[in-house]
Amino acid sequence: MLLVAAPGAAGAQVFLASRPNPEFMVGPLFVRLAVTPELGVTLDVLWSLVVPPNKSGAAIAQDLYLLWPNSVGASTAGAPDPALAAYVTARGFTPIREGRLPLFAQSLYRIGEEMPPEPVKGGAPFVTFVRLGGPLGLTAPVTYVRIPWTPLLANRTWLMDLRMEVTDLVKRRTATWIEDLFWGPHYALALTFNDVRPRALFPLYFEHRDRVVRLADDPSQLVINFRDADHLKIYDVFPRTANRRLSETLDSTEEISMFLDRSEGISPQVLTVQFGYFKGLRTWAPVIIPIIFFFVGNLTMPVFMMIFRRTKREIVNRVHIGPGDAARETGVVLSREALARIVPGTTTYEDILKMGGGEPEEHEQLATPDRRTVFYRGSRIVPQRRRRFGWLATVSGWSVEQHEVEITLDRNVVADVQARVRRSPLPPTGP
């Protein structure tokens, strides 16, 4: 049994014999997928049959059938086999495509120019079908392939090669715009072995489950070859035990493979790869884009800073946040109420310090050591409001008040108090 599926859609590939309880097995088996940068996908299923030592090839001679989980590309290998379409139609399915797939025989000892793959005359007829009705509606397309018997099937020195252009196997992954900008689109594909759950496939499998050709002990693999490895980015491979390396026989090709475990029985075995191709400017994107941002940032930063400062100045000049009587003060500004509590002849130096706080400016004269003058100076920036919305108000302008309080003390008792206030408008450059 053998399966290829796109992520998120289960699929299966199952070899069936013409007669029940086949005595032979499939082995070795290689499901080899070739992916190009243009996302063209070609799949080769290579296999041989393991015949019991007490049987001859003539004794087991029979056609094989293949259940495939997807539709296949158009084929020009010959006319279709009407019997296949009639077979699936009789079981309530609707054929949507017919034709023949290329079938080759490859010698294990004479490979390449010495003896290229030998085409099997007539190829392998197929029919792709769906189920239109039923409680769950339209099904995904699957394909039924007949592999005609040839004596080379039972020859252990030859591998049969069924080639097809598969569709809907590569799915685009959702990615962030940064990932698309730097590396281009991300894709995912999966080769799956031993899964018979597709709705259009399972009825045929269940009807002929006694004709399933089992997997032999020979090494069998799922293999994915990515061409143009210099422009390939592999993001993830599952399972982690899968082997990843450069192909030993193909130039600039990344090979990812996984050995099949026949002891898993009917449990699916999946090889999943997430990948992407990058070409042209994307090859240099990780270098070029930071350089562009660096130069653009240095060129535009003065402009942005100028706009930012001007905007900040306008906001500070035209908007005020705070209670209605709020003002911006520096130094020490004594309020009218505080000044009213300063009574000449009664208020002491200690009382003055409690009211004004801090460390006021003091003047003393040597001629009158018992007499000194204390100064409190401060300024207030006061907004001139237009409209007010709670603590938020628009401002038409600002004025500056310079406050100065002169307190004369005789023997640490207040003798005289003088308060002066100067007001002037604040220029619109900002407080």
Image (cartoon, helix red, strand yellow):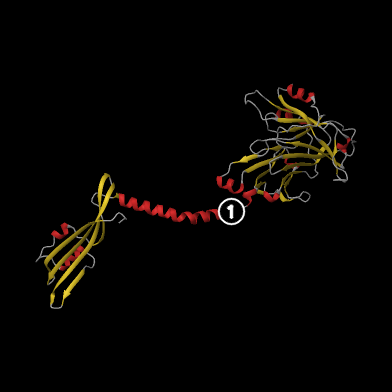
In the picture shown, does residue 242 fall above or below 141? below
Q: Quadrant of the N terminus?
A: top right
| Residue 119 horizontal/vertical position (percent) | 85, 36
Q: Which picture quadrant has residue 143? A: top right
Q: Could you tell me if residue 392 is visible in this image?
A: no
**Secondary element at tag 1:** helix
| Residue 310 horizontal/vertical position (percent) | 37, 53
In the picture shown, does residue 229 fall above or below 216? below
Residue located beneath label 1 in the image: 288
Q: Quadrant of the C terminus?
A: bottom left
Q: Which picture quadrant has residue 39? A: top right
| Residue 70 horizontal/vertical position (percent) | 70, 33
Label 1 Cα neighbours within 10 Å, binned few <14 / some 14-19 / many ≥20: some
Q: Is residue 164 left or right of residue 390?
A: right
The residue under the point 18% across, 68% down is 374
Q: Which picture quadrant has residue 123? A: top right
- In the image, 337 versus 373, the foreground residue is 373
| Residue 277 horizontal/vertical position (percent) | 66, 46
